[in-house]
Image (cartoon, grey):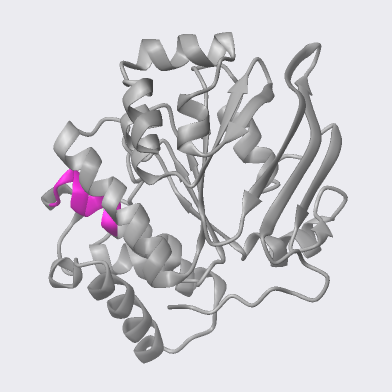
Amino acid sequence: MVDHPVPEGGDSQVHVSIRDITKAYGSFEILHGVSFDVLRGKTNVVIGASGAGKTVLMRQIIRLERPDTGTIVVDGQDIVPLGELALGQVRKKFGMVFQMSALFDSMSVFDNVAFPLREHTRLRARAVREKVMDRLEKLGVGAAHRKMPSELSGGMKKRVAVARALVLEPAILIYDEPTTGLDPVTSRTVDELILQTQESFGVTSLVISHDMASVFHIADQIHFLYKGRVEVSGTPAEIAGSSHPPLLEFLRASGVDAAAVAAHG
């Protein structure tokens, strides 16, 4: 496990605190005052229908964009007002696992995972190899290090993408719709991968998803984003037992048996 100590002044339980975030593009406001906490060392999931603002929210959290108003406090530091130089240090705390894995087709598995180290560190080739192989082997794909992405199954691609995200030892791992485009069996394999990664590497996981079968399996905390606001937050059992009308409609449309989830929560 990689040890990620709590910085002085940071909350031991809350890793990222998001308060009153708004974001508009021209006159079109996407986020209308989003507030929720990302719990340290837990799997935190943001759910919501297409167009609810999930991707825009993710871009604010990792400060690819600056919110119009509000605060995003990471380890006790508000990152909203930071300039690019300071943001470079903050972004090292985050690792990203993109939709469809987003591996470089022209690079081998090894070179895909080595890419962040070669871009952002001055490690010698031997140290790069040791770090890359350590991540690949811990995620069960060490034997595939010479293969090209086109030779991998969907589940193996996701493992390589996680290895690449972890190679710089981030404290927070963000998964953007990790089961999109995968068959049900592979999707459940990815669920186990998310849980395994959290346990093995001690990361805080933030998952953006609308795959409710996956969400109820992996989540410690769920946040329902609706029309640009987090309307409901809670444990899987609390979400399943909620009486919030838009959330109930969302759960019914997803096909998940909320009553069964609540009964076993």
Name the one closer to the observer, 253 or 227: 253
Horizontal relation, residue 253 to residue 245: left or right:
left
In the rendering, at what x and y percent does residue 32 appear?
77, 21
In the rendering, at what x and y percent does residue 26 appear?
80, 16
Above or below for 195 versus 69: below
In the rendering, at what x and y percent does residue 65 appear?
72, 39
Above or below for 26 versus 65: above
Task: State yes or no: residue 235 in magenta.
Answer: no
Above or below for 263 versus 51: below
Q: Quadrant of residue 7?
A: bottom right
In the rendering, at what x and y percent does residue 204 appear?
53, 59
Magenta region: 152-159
Residue located at (35% from left, 66% from top): 113
Residue located at (54% from left, 67% from top): 170
Which of the image's four quarters has the N terminus?
bottom left
Name the one closer to the observer, 149 or 222: 222
Name the one closer to the observer, 97 or 1: 1
Q: Quadrant of residue 90?
A: bottom right
- Overall secondary structure of the magenta stretch? helix
Task: State yes or no: residue 155 in magenta.
Answer: yes
Q: For residue 181, say whether it is visible.
A: yes
